Image (cartoon, grey):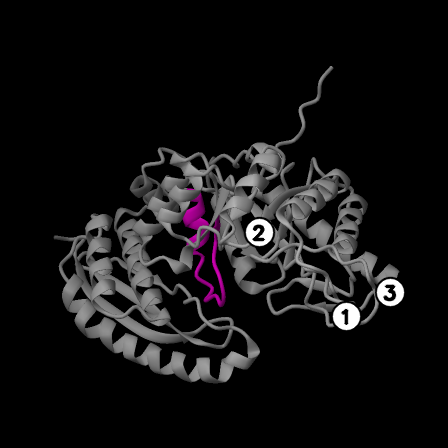
Amino acid sequence: MLTSIVTVDARKIMDTRGMPTIEVDVGLACGSRGRAAISAAGATQPEQHANAGRRAQDDTLDTITMVNNQVTHAIAGLDVMNQQCLDERLQALARAHPCTPSRGNAYLSLSVAACRAAAAARNWPLHMHIAELAGTGRCEIPIPMISVLSARAHPDDHAATHELMIIPTGANSMAQAAHMSSLVRSAIATLCQQYGLTVLMTLDGRLSPSCHSTREALELLQHAIAIAGLVPGEDVHIAIDGDGTVLRDIADKSPQPPAPPVPTTAEITHTLNQWRAHFAIGTVVDALDASDWDGWQSLTQTLGSHLQLPGNRLFANQPDRLRQGAGLAVANAIVINANQKTTLTDIIDMVALAKQHQYASILSSVDGETGDTFMADLAVGTAAGQIRAGSLHTSNAARQYSQLLRIEASSDIAYATPPFPLRRPVAHP
């Protein structure tokens, strides 16, 4: 069969954390080839790097040997046009062998490389082949959720929020969305200089001005949107990532303010309601702890019609947790971390499950990256609607957004419509 797998080659490369990871080539009988390098989730804290680096090196070399021997033997001869059959074989291998971070990354890289080889054999763009696999019937350019501020990376920063992002909901194309995002980022830098704020830059490209509270960071971002010539809440919405921790709005500007008591769900809901009234907030990711199902239920009942409330740690990429959340009417969106799944079919099924339960999907990835732009094609092919690839000021995120721009420029694929809480207000006569 011309589209059967005849060669598999795995090798070591480096990700953006400087950690070893795996790149895989899949070759077909017809001569078409596919390559993928999906980064593995793993420890990224500085104090973990020494041991993590040694473990990752050993794990990566062991995994390369496994892929080039046992895995190659197990999938040789399989037809890449039957992605589900291939992925079932890979899932069986993952169950048979302990799935370390590097091995999980290898299985997904194999799955994506085979998908690329299949698309190449058909002379189709990758996103079109994925759309057929997903059965979406259409492709869609996703709305980007772009990181701009780290609200707690500065040593003098007492904000509780992990990350502030912008969503260019008023854009009608990816090109316009990228332009809006660039304007806002430049405006933030200008304001920080005017206010005399000390600014650091995080490893993932976010600015970290010396704000003393989340509210102060929100004021800075809202002002930046306005001086960029855009309308907060219409052209651009703000997204907050609470990182699975409780949100606190610490107003004490002393160097070491006393730790405030842990707020209740009612207090967090009240704070978000206040912020929503004053700022162009459209999305709050992981507003509460992942184990607080009752709190999430209450929060969703109160704010779910006003805000996009995605669960990231809440659903933990697990279909059963998403089904449980849907049954409890918890959250209204899900962050799907693509590089934490074992195969392409797993990701496609997760997006489909979210749509089935009327949850908005945000495709994302975690930890180090490799420059592989697979996630951009995946977001288009599955019509996920939203993508979270990071800051425009990192090379990997820029590659993902640039791939979306290429797809948009070379096709007539429509730009996604924002989910209900983020839609532009309708003007009434």
Report how far apart the C-alphas of labels 3 and 2 lie in the structure: 33 Å
Residue span colored magenta: 362-380
Tag shown at residue 288: 2
Residue type highlighted by circle 3: Gly
Residue type highlighted by circle 1: Asp
Q: Is residue 124 left or right of residue 417?
A: left
Report how far apart the C-alphas of labels 1 and 2 lie in the structure: 24 Å
Helix or strand or loop: what does disc 2 sit on? loop
Looking at the picture, how far across and down is residue 297, in whole percent? Answer: 53, 41
Q: Residue at x 74, y 42 (%)?
A: 274
Looking at the picture, how far across and down is residue 315, in whole percent? Answer: 44, 50
Q: Is residue 396 left or right of residue 242?
A: left
Tag shown at residue 196: 3
* Magenta segment includes 365: yes
Q: Residue at x 54, y 74 (%)?
A: 45
**Compared to 293, does 93 lie above or below?**
below
Do the residues under discs 3 and 2 have CB atoms within 8 angstroms?
A: no
Looking at the picture, how far across and down is residue 400, in whole percent? Answer: 51, 55
Residue type highlighted by circle 2: Leu
* Near-viewer residue (154 or 86): 154
Q: Is residue 30 left or right of residue 275?
A: left
Report if residue 31 is visible in the image. Answer: no
Give the labeled residue for mark 1. 156
Given this view, does label 1 or label 2 mark the residue nearer the observer?
2
Helix or strand or loop: what does disc 3 sit on? loop
Decide which of tag 3 and tag 2 comes sooner along the chain: 3
* Magenta segment includes 40: no
The C terminus - image quarter: top right
Q: Classify mark 1: residues with Cα within 10 Å, few (<14), some (14-19) or many (20+).
A: some
Q: Is residue 64 left or right of residue 327?
A: left
Q: Residue at x 52, y 51 (%)?
A: 292
Given this view, does label 1 or label 3 mark the residue nearer the observer?
1
